Amino acid sequence: MTECSLRPSPTRVLSLWTLLIGSFNIAGLRQGCWSVRAESLDAVNLSAVAGGDATLPCDTRSPQPPDALLLVVWYKDDVPIYSYDSREKSPSAHWADDSLGGRARWHAAPHAALRIRDVLPTDRALYRCRVDFKVSPTRNYKFILHVIELPEKPKIFDAREKEVVGVAGPYIEDTSLKLTCVVSGGKPMPRVRWWRDDKVIATLAAAEDGSRLSLLELKIPKLKREYFEAVYTCTADNTALVPPLRTNVQIQLYLRPLFVEILAREQPLSVGQEAELACRAVGARPPAIITWWLDDKPVAVTEPQKNSDDFNETVSFLRWTPRMEHDGRVLTCRASHVKLEHTTIETTMSLNLHYVPIVVLQLGSKLNPNDIEEGDDVYFECVVRANPPAYKVVWEHNGQVMTHNQRAGVIAGSAHLALQGVSREQAGRYVCTASNVEGDGRSPPVNLLVIYKPVCKNTEVIIVGAAVNEAAKVTCEVDAFPPPKNFQWTINNTIGTVELEAGKFTVDGAGRSVLSYTPSGDTDYGSLACRATNLAGQQIEPCRYTLLPAVKPDPPSNCSSLNLTDDSAELRCVAGYDGGLQTTYVVEAWETEALVANVSATAPVWKLHGLGSGKALTLVFYANNARGRSEITTLRVHTLSRLALQTEANTRSNRVDSSWALGIVAGIVGTLIAVTIIALVAKRKHHRPLQYEAPTQTAKAYKGSIQPVNHSPIQPDDKNPDVVPLGKDFNCTRDEERPPEPPPYGAVVSPPVGSSKSTHSLHDVRSNTPHTPNTPASDIQSIGTLAEDRRSVTSGTLSRRREVVTTRTPLLANARESCV
């Protein structure tokens, strides 16, 4: 029959009107049959597992957009079982036959399909999807749904037809093994396989012989030690939709001990001292039973034997105190198997009773250990008692082995050690070690105390800054033994050398004194000296300090970029004079007038992150202390572009190793660079006034493109050959081009609208006189106005030696070209 008519069924709930409307072309009421015969379509095979889900796809897209979908009807063996009417907006748009039991549902998105839950074996059938459109012809899709019935989980039986669960055995070593894997059910019949270590060792192919059982045997004629705890797996599968069903079994064996040994058997035993001996047996399963014997007489063991984590090793510990009459007798360790007879093995050792040297270290009897000063002669005596005799004696000082060195005053012998003219470095712990075949005997350490006068821990002259009527803390630290209890402070100024009162400084027990000094005028500045006194005497060379008025710090100089990436930068400058106070170094990264980053550090080394890719940034460096902030130093950098990095990486990965190709590319690039340089030089000469042209230079001298002079506060200049930058994107500005100085502390300055919250911004602070492009007079006027503005904003007179770092030669002939 054709699809022009429907066979009614008493169990069908689909309304006649829905079927009639869906059977005709609503837009044109075209004549004739509205579908093709189902038998004319090629069916697609689909598989689903019983109890799982099945998805039957159906393409509802119209071949003539914007044609609309009207009706979707699903047939099972030419019987309608489900429909979806897109003209209905209520739940009644979906209809399902009672035979589906609510297990089916049409889903239009993301992919149109009929999904059936809890698939039953009765769902195995030929399905057809009919799709009706408003204009386009009706479409039909056919599917054959195969329902896979999984087999039962495999079961394993031994040679006595007893089911094996988890573990097979234990079997005696060198006997045979037979295991049978039985699988019941499955449609189609399953494939059965034996596995070991992810390798197939036996296979039973699927066969449709009407039997409901599949049997596959595993035979091992001789069980060697390698089969111990081996895991075999039996799997059954009849579809790739779900993982195979599997059952594991582990082989257990009785194994005899392989060998037995007494650990550390070469070490002699010490007479009269309890010793611990260990005997180890390897390879027995279950673990071996270990016993100890002395001349065929059992020796009692108080501790239970211990097994390793894998039970492959067994260790028995014997705590025993030998006597002199035991010397030369035989000690035996035996290992036996609890299940296997005639497998006992043993090992023996002859007792040779020795002992480790007993060593005592003594300081010379005529020396007072509490009154040894630098320059005194010191000697030690090492008393050794050993059997067998010691064959060497080693001297140690603070854990380091000492050697005989008469020129250095170290005379080392087997029983004595002499130190001529002892120094403070030779104080510490001394140990004497004697060795024989039994081992090394170390003496208790003897601590040598050497008394010496104080010396400064920091031998350099330290500069200290102090403001008038403000207290400055000066710390004096010395190295001495014993620690000094008395300190003396003096100051040398225009008045002379004056000893400071004891109330102005403190002394602690760690050899440190802290002076609190408050200068009241210019005459109170000068040189400070600190001397300490201990039991050995007064310090010979004092610790010296230069007391200067505290001032603002000098700006950082010689700033450079050590590592520049697409988003970060590592920066370093040379610190200037810190003004005698603790100084903080700051770097700010600006993009036009926006503050990108602000980092402070105790040393002029910074790491900036989050700068952004392909950014042209101006870096501002300055120093801060309690007296104020230094002038600024600027540096221009360009962060790398991520696109450039990716292009470079792709180029490296795809590089062709061909010399002739590289030669052609190099020639083309060289030609393009030469043409570009000539064009830029010609353009520069055309636009620049003659009276401001710099001395004639070749393109090679500039090593880059030449740009016309602009009037921005931050100009890109040519690189200065006198200062070599660290990176290709690194440059800095001249004094005339750097951002304006910040206002002095206490001044109130209103930032421009949209400026950063930083202490200064990079907006132009020049005069409001308009600039005339490429006019020499305007250039001179702008530079002069900027210098005046800086003098009006900052307090005090600017030091002309504090210049801003630059590594680019200015285009203006009359501008400075040096960098600090």
Image: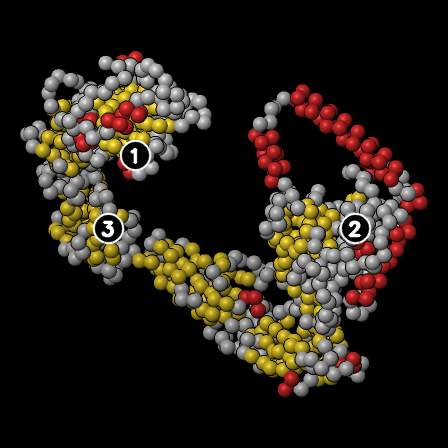
Residue 592 in percent (x, y) is at: 70, 52
Q: Which residue is drawn at 33% across and 24% down?
A: 131
Residue 705, image x, y percentages: 78, 38
**Residue type, label 2:** Ser
- Tell me the quarter of the picture where residue 111 sits: top left
Q: Alpha-carbon distance for marks 2 and 1? A: 72 Å
Residue 93 numbered mark, or none:
1
**Residue at image x 34%, y 32%?**
86
Q: Could you tell me residue 445's position as x and y percent?
A: 43, 67
**Of pointers 2 and 3, the one earlier in the residue sequence:** 3
Give the residue type at disc 3: Ala
Check disc 1: other Cα within 10 Å, few if <14, some if 14-19, many if 20+. some
Q: Quick one: label 2 or label 1, which is nearer the N terminus?
A: 1
Horizontal side, residue 663 vs residue 19: left or right: right
Which circle, 2 or 3, is nearer the viewer? 2
> What residue is drawn where x is 49% and y is 59%?
400
User: Observer-nearest residue: 412 or 204?
Assistant: 204
Please give the residue where the numbered disc 3 appears in the rendered image.
Answer: 278
Instruction: Report whether 221 appears left or right of 407.
Output: left
Give residue 763's mark: none
- Residue 459 falls in which quadrant of the image? bottom right
In the displayed structure, does residue 413 sit left or right of residue 787? Answer: left
Q: How far apart are marks 2 and 3 (CA)?
A: 87 Å
Rendering coords of residue 513 (x, y %) = 61, 78
Give the position of the N terminus as an image quadrant.
Answer: top left
Q: Quick one: label 2, few (<14), some, or many (20+) residues within 10 Å? A: few
Q: Which residue lies furthest to the left in this view?
A: 160
Q: Mark 2 points at which residue?
A: 712
Q: Is residue 246 visible?
A: no
